[in-house]
Image (cartoon, coloured by chain):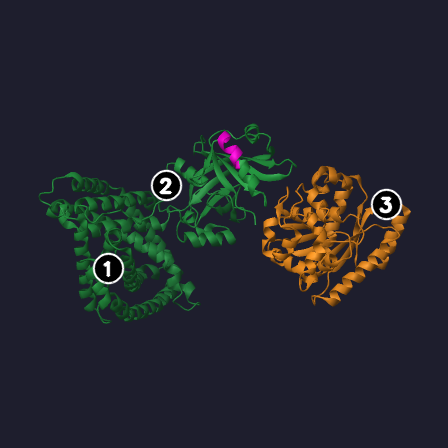
Amino acid sequence: MTAEPIELIATQPATLDSIDRALDGGFTAQRLDAWESDHILLDTFDRLLRSEGWTLAHQYGRLALSDRRMIIPVASGPPSGSPSGPLFGRDLPAGDLRQRVADAIDVRALLPLGRLHIRTEAYRITDDLQKTVVRVNVLVPQLISRGGSATPLSTRLRIQEVRGYQDERDEVIAALSPALGLGDADQTLPDEAILACGERPEGFSTKVAVPLDAGDPTGIAVSRVMRALLEVIEANLPGTLADTDSEFLHDYRVSIRRTRAVQRQFKHVFDPEELKRARAEFKWLQQSTGDARDLDVYVLGFDAMRELLPEEIRPDLEPVLTVLGRRRMVAHSAMGRALRSERARETFEAWERILGVLDHGPDADRPYSRRPIGEYTSRRIRKVYRRMLDMGRAIDAESPPEEFHDLRKKGKELRYLLELFGQPLHDSSVVKPMIKTLKSLQDVLGHHQDREVQIAMLRSLADEVAVLPGGARALMAMGMLTCRLEEDAADTRGRFGKVFEEFAAKDQRRLVKDTFS
Amino acid sequence: MNARVLATYNIKGGVGKTSAAVNLAYLAARDGHPTLLWDLDPQGASTFLFRIRPRLKGGARELVALRSRVGELIKGTDHERLELLPADFSLRHLDLDLDAFKRPALRLAKVIEPMRAEYDFIFLDCAPSISLVSESVFEAADALLVPIIPAALSSRTFEQLEDLAGRSQDGLGGRDGAQVLAFFSMVEVGRPMHRNEMARLRGAHHLTMLGAGVPDSEDVERMGEERDPVGAFAPASPAAMAYEALWLDIQRRLRTTRR
């Protein structure tokens, strides 16, 4: 099989003359062809395609999926219009490309990241028998701004070995290297282009992994984690306001919730009065985004929920979707007003000031601030774990839904503590399985909570749905659906005992005690 | 992929076997098919025409003995998707090398087997002879492409060949033998003898005789000078057109059932 092309960066101009001179009679270069191409690079905010090892580009009215270097084609789609806004998996033309991309991006939107213009010159290098032994493509790429101005990017040589001529390929590279200033391509072409746009090639992830040392003062460590969370909040704000895709709001809220959990768990490192105000404001931010997120979840999960009904009844639920859509619009608009408000701006400004105090301010009245983070974290993790044991032991299948929900909220706190502080400070072979066990418990609790919320939501929609055309049928279907959801919630409550047992098992308790002592 | 193996073969030499192998392999690759041309003739004319050095590391003996390493000997040509397994002089002893195996006539098919996954078509350019090598080729090939000069002795040659191919299919691998597809080569349409002989053979062997014929042409002779298939340097020439027609005809006539 033929080897993949080698990609090298040239710091000197690569032309027929310069290539031929560099080969110095040992080989001969011949220019075969030259062409120009335009590519609009597309990926999600968190670069889901890049993490699959792919690059997606819109070129000449088609979508083309290739390897990350844009060398090996993976799949291409039939003609489609140029992307003027975000594209979702469902917007892609049906076929192999859609299947791969839609699976990878799930609910995220593909965003245009930058426009590349590439001039390619194709050369063949021949030996003394005039036999082609190497093929070289010289790429001269430019990044084109929205205004049309061009920023030159590194010239790239893609060197394709002809099968059976590996030695000749190596000789050609050795001959070209000094003359053209060839060096390894540390970045792929798409990554270089995205960096030149001022963006991160790896995109933005909600995963916060701040390296910590057990001896770090708690105040400083907490401040570093909080700043990383703040960065995620700020990065997700524009996409949340523009409603680009539902994950922006989700990630925004997760980071707010994580911030609130850290505020609560490390309250002694803050000035009590300032923390009180900040906690109230972050709670307000969480509440201001709650309805919009709930409605996103209803809409996203609507089809799955509808499948609980017999197939012939499913279409009857259509008016529910209409009302949900309407409510979603209202909720997003209210959320937009809150997040754009002076109050929100002041909340973050004040928060920045508070974090500044953690870094440099006096700590006489914050005695815990100087304590080592390792010790502090261990105590918090032990304490939250024990609290969860108490809460969980008090729950049985007959307990009211609120008790399940409270346990779930405590579980989220434990999870954030483990992810943000436990993982960087403790043995990951202990922390990771612990997070996994916790996740299994949280999944059951989450499913139960979702069903409770869905039941409440259906009840709250009834009046509005009733007055729509098809409202009566819809109400009947909603009634049936409510029964199914209640049955499912009861089933989930039945599953709780087993997963909680695992979470609270003796060896698990001992592990927590030993690890976080 | 499961490559079709097509061998250009004739007992006689100088009838256009190599020209056909080189041009048909070129057209297959041009049409998008990963294609291999195996030069089995120790004279290495196909190897020469693609400007590849006639060198088989380890010689023919290793080639048939260490079949897993055949891939290392394959060379890319100047044309995309077209690769060549070159010849060198060691192939003159291929008969003896094959004879060292328990079932010598099946050995070539075994050597080809792992390569079938990599290509759509594998062309074998065979030396003119009746030997263990040709017997092995009959076993390995799905079809024999037989160039016939439409002259007096050709029908006799043709019948001998059908007889040989037939014997092979009865005797060895327990399979349907290679399909025989003959075509006229080095045709001089101005010569009545050629026209008459073509008409006669087409009548007598209409099932195996292909319609397309390759003219006796300077363009084909120029291949030695250009060291390229006619289709690459003179795509509009009558010879290039004839190979195009021949390739279409062959694809249409290849048995739909596979081994």
Where does residue A194 sit, x and y in percent of width and height?
Answer: 41, 39
Chain hosting mark 2: A
Label 1 SS: helix
Distance from disc 3 to disc 1, alpha carbons, whole Å, reads 91 Å
Distance from disc 1 to disc 2, alpha carbons, whole Å, reads 32 Å
Determine which residue is flagged by label 1: A411
Determine which residue is flagged by label 3: B189
Please state the extent of the stretch shown in magenta in the rendering. A173-180
Colour chain A is painted in: green
Does residue A29 lie above or below B112 as drawn?
Answer: above
Where does residue B5 sit, x and y in percent of width and height?
Answer: 68, 56
- Quadrant the C terminus of chain A occupies: bottom left
Does residue A419 lie above or below A462 as drawn?
Answer: above
* Mark 2 or mark 3, whichever is nearer to me: 3
Colour chain B is painted in: orange
Q: From the viewer's perspective, is B219 left or right of A292?
A: right
Would you call the spot at circle 2 few (<14 residues within 10 Å), some (14-19), or many (20 or more)?
some
Q: Is residue B119 magenta?
A: no
Label 2 SS: loop
Where does residue A3 sit, x and y in percent of width and height?
Answer: 54, 46
Determine which residue is flagged by label 2: A200
Image quadrant in which you'd find residue A381: bottom left
Image quadrant in which you'd find residue A27: top right
